[in-house]
Image: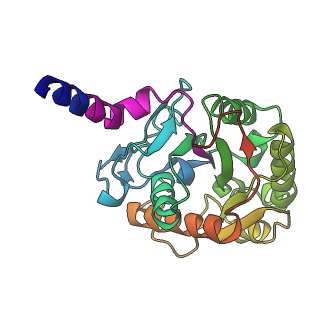
Amino acid sequence: MLSLILFILLAYAWLLKPAQVVHGSGFLYKDIFLLAGQSNMAGRGGVVDEKWDRLVPPEIKPKPSILRFSAKLRWEEAAEPLHADIDVNKTCGVGPGLAFANVIRDKDSSIGVVGLVPCAVGGTNIHEWARGTHLYNQLVRRAMASLNEGGAIRAILWYQGESDTLSKSDAQSYKENLEKFIQNLLSDLNSPMIPIIQVALASGQGPFIETVREAQLGTDLPNVRCVDAKGLPLEVDNLHLTTPAQLTLGEMLADAFLNYFQGSIPITSNAPRR
């Protein structure tokens, strides 16, 4: 009898073991969010002179209920830097993704396992995200592959544009290029209803920051909302958000999703929700 009880307890503990949920998830349903854009989405919080301080606030420590989709198209427990194997030519640090995931789970009990799909690459111009480019194709491929084990794409988080502040022509054409990118992406993902939450720039690499910001804040497409990062603290390079700023941005993105888009129609796989 004692051995039977011990067996039951061990079996129960095994079922609750976080590593089993992550590495043997099978068709576990996931609320999936795509993270795309350039360096501030990839995360440079805590990075100075190409060195990351490795300081991870307790609010975004790894949890078995928050996963990331690796470069090898595998689900694993999410941990900073989320983009380490995606934005491989730069040093990645803390971004807004984990803060976003923690806030939506804390504020909405209907959200279970969150799946984050890192796709951002630092220093990229909006032209490099046009349909048919490497970055665009990779984004679509990773998005569709993330659905294979069950789940739904609930939103796309987009933070890009710093590189487009260098040239007046790039800045002036940004709104047209951004809207075309969004329309093409939703079409190629076979769902015009996926919410997109974009970030208006806090900084830029050139003198045309306000031109790009006006384009971002003036984007007028269904299911697109914008949160404004202007005024958030920057690292010493005056370009990238600090770690505390990234946490604030993650909460802003989460609030935008919960306030405007919760209950929206997502792309779904064939797997049941729970």
Question: Viewed as shown, does residue 49 lie left or right of 157?
Answer: left
Q: Where on the picture, by quarter, is residue 212?
A: bottom right
Q: Is residue 103 magenta?
A: no
Image coordinates of residue 225 in percent, x first then y, are: 73, 66
- Residue at the left extreme? 2
- Residue at the front extreme? 1
Q: Residue at the location (85% across, 67% down)?
A: 220
- Depicted 265 relative to depicted 273: above or below: below
- What segment is highlighted magenta in the picture? 11-32
**258 or 35, nearer to the observer:** 258
Image coordinates of residue 196 in percent, x first then y, are: 72, 57
Residue 234 appears in the figure: no
Q: Where on the picture, by quarter, is residue 115?
A: top right
Image coordinates of residue 163 in percent, x first then y, are: 66, 52
Question: Viewed as shown, does residue 41 lie left or right of 66?
Answer: right
Q: Where on the picture, by quarter, is residue 230?
A: bottom right
